[in-house]
């Protein structure tokens, strides 16, 4: 009964309903989101090692080296946003902070698209 009421208020656009539904579901998403972020970090570094050996990461002589540092910067920005959202926004989530959370979601989406484009450039080196 409570869940039906929450869903009804969510679909009617009530901020309070959205907040309550997010509070209930945020911990179930964390079980998926944090391991996915860790897998992204590990596979990203292991794929970078295929194209650029670790001993040459400081060298910026080829486009692969530049793409590597762009991807590492985007990856660090994604991890930073994830840590900030997890420890500073989600525990104190209120109606007023929903816009800040939505801004984090938008930024992570933009970073994800940038990671894909940079990954294609890394692979095909013509973007």
Image (tube, rainbow, N blue to C red):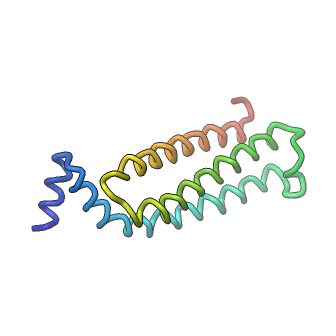
Query: Which quadrant holds residue 122?
Result: top right
Q: Outermost residue, front direction?
A: 96
Residue positioned 14% across, 54% down in the render:
8
The front one of 101 and 10 is 101
Q: Where's residue 88, x and y in %? A: 48, 62
Q: Look at 45% across and 48% down and name the residue there.
A: 105
The quadrant of the rendering that contains the C terminus is: top right
Q: Residue at x 31, y 60 (%)?
A: 22
Instruction: List x then y, in percent, for residue 18.
Output: 26, 54
Quarter placement of the N terminus:
bottom left
Residue at the far left in the pictured view = 1
Total marks in image: 0
**Residue 94 lies in quadrant:** bottom left
Residue at 30% in and 54% down: 95
Q: Position of residue 39 (x, y in %)?
A: 59, 63
Up-down relation of residue 127 to residue 82 (above or below): above
Question: Percent position (x, y) of residue 3?
Answer: 16, 65
Question: 100 left or right of 84?
Answer: left
Q: Is residue 3 left or right of residue 114?
A: left
- Which of 123 and 111 lies nearest the eye of the viewer? 111
């Amino acid at each position: 009964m409570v869940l039906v009421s929450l869903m009804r208020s969510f679909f009617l656009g009530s901020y309070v309903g959205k907040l309550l539904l997010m509070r209930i579901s945020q911990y179930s998403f964390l079980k998926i989101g944090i391991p996915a972020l860790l897998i992204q970090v590990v596979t990203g570094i292991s794929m970078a090692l295929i194209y650029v050996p670790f001993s040459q990461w400081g060298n910026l002589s080829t486009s692969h080296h530049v793409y590597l540092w762009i991807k590492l910067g985007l990856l660090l920005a994604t991890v930073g946003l994830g840590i900030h959202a997890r420890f500073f926004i989600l525990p104190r989530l209120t109606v007023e902070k929903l816009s800040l959370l939505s801004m984090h979601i938008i930024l992570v989406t933009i970073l994800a698209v940038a990671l894909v484009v940079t990954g294609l450039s890394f692979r095909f080196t013509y973007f």
